[in-house]
Image (cartoon, grey):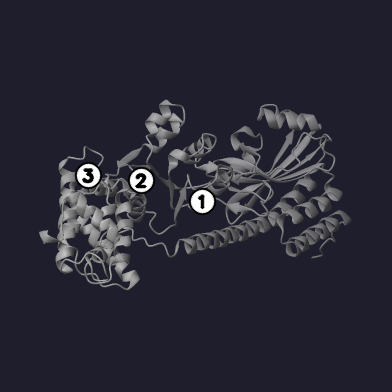
Amino acid sequence: MAHSSPTPEELDRLHLLLDITNLLVSHRDLGDLFETLSSALRGRLGHDLLILSLWNAEKDTVRLLYLDFPTSRGAFPSTPTGHEKALSRLPWAPAIRERRTMLLHAEDYDMADPDVSAKVKGEGLQTSVSVPLQSRDRVLGVLNFASRRVDAFAPEDIHLMERVAAQVALALDNALAYQEIQSLKDRLSEEKHYLESEVGEDFAPDEVIGDSPAIQTVLRQVRAAAPSDATVLLQGETGTGKELMARLVHEQSRRRDRTFVKLNCAAIPFGLLESELFGHEKGAFTGAIQQKKGRLELADGGTLFLDEVGELPLELQPKLLRALQEREFERLGGTRTLSVDVRLIAATNRDLEQMVKEGRFRADLFYRLHVFPVRMPPLRDRREDIPALARYFIQKHARRLGRAITRIPPAVMEALQAGAWPGNIRELENFLERSVILSTGAELKAPLSELRVPESVSTSREALTLDEAERQAILQALRDSKGRVAGPSGAAAKLGIKRTTLQSRMKKLGLATADI
């Protein structure tokens, strides 16, 4: 049986498909490929406009990826990236939903999204063809060909568009997969860099010291909140361990295997805070020589800890609120909307409710943060935990400094429990680190004269206890030094204070060497 030879038109189409195949193989950059492809097809199909759009099945939206319109009158954007429309508002929606090619005319756009309809009329477009891009049994997007001529495309032209779209879909699928791999590599690199910067921080998320009712109440709240993925607001004075609790919430959540990213809102200058939180695009501001991912993006899939959230500027609060509620944001200087899945933990030593009343903090953001509030108790409300905390910090710093401290004088421990500690646990640790440095033997030498008395009246029971503890510590040092005040083995050296300071304290307490 004889086979008829292909017509010149069929040969022309086959050559065109071969050229397109070569283009797909030789171009790695999808943008370059699209421009070359549109130029090659225009000579054959005579279209004025070619658009490549991606479909987001989860959000059911379409985003313009590339647009080629050399004769545009200016109605369409020159840089379409970031322009997103609901698929339901577009007349060619069935092309994606039903996976079929559609031939449309100008009147079909009258019921479309007003913005799209206005652009079509503004450019004088009369005919368009929408071809779904299908690969591996899924729709990636659509190729839209449009012309200012009525009935511009013949059936054989539409057939050629479908064959071209099949090859473009394969190239697009591969390009998107490559971009996803690169994005994951970049993210892993960013996370690795962030985590390396965290290495060396002396932090143990599972180390919560204390059996007092106050801290046990907090731990019960943490155990309840951690699995829920709810926003946690840690409130309390400075130095009460809010970051430790934030890490504990993360460690007990389903996100424990992903990154815990922290940002102190008070530690970063206002001009850089938006970039640090949301990231920026290249050229967004002077000095932005390359794209940078923000802490929010780094925490995707994990936990973002915003410390001192009360210091967040009012100008940035709506953007944070949107990221929490809509799970999307844009980098500084960018137009592309990014999606993010982050569990937020915030901390503050400010009274946010009062700040809301004063107009210094947005009420809607406060209520969004106040989903699960946890109040951290000050050290004065958990004094029974001080001995355990003291032993932990002394061992920690003694090990680091190569000291062997095995004894804490009872008078020192009593003084520690009676102190004011306005800086809470952080102040206690700093004081004990200083004490370890001053201690040369097995016994801790604490500079008790530096301890602050509670701000209540000086005759309070705690103040009397502190004076008595100091009195006992001085007497014990005098006994150990056989009444000597000065010298290397004198009482002043044993207490880690100056001779004149000891003499002054002895005079205030009415002590003399004869009292030993």
Amino acid under disc 1? Arg
| Foreground pick, 338 / 115 | 338
Q: Taking the image as drawn, is residue 211 in sight?
A: no
Amino acid under disc 2? Thr
Left or right relative to 405: residue 96: right
Looking at the image, is mark 1 or mark 3 earlier in the sequence? Answer: 1
Left or right relative to 361: residue 67: right
Q: Which mark is residue 215?
A: none
Q: Classify residue 69 by image quadrant.
A: top right
Looking at the image, is mark 2 or mark 1 earlier in the sequence? Answer: 2
- Residue extending furthest toward the right: 8
| Foreground pick, 470 / 434 | 470
| Foreground pick, 497 / 83 | 497
Compared to 111, does 244 lie above or below?
below
Gap in angstroms between the C-alphas marked 2 and 1: 23 Å
Compared to 355, does 408 lie above or below?
below
- Nearer to us: label 1 or label 3: 3
Please, what secondary structure does the residue beneath circle 3 have? helix
Q: Which mark is residue 295?
A: 1
Q: Which residue is mark 2?
A: 238
Quarter of the figure that contains the N terminus? bottom right
Q: Classify residue 512 by image quadrant.
A: bottom left
Q: Which residue is mark 3?
A: 381
Whole-percent x, y for residue 24 in the image: 74, 61
Gap in angstroms between the C-alphas marked 2 and 3: 14 Å
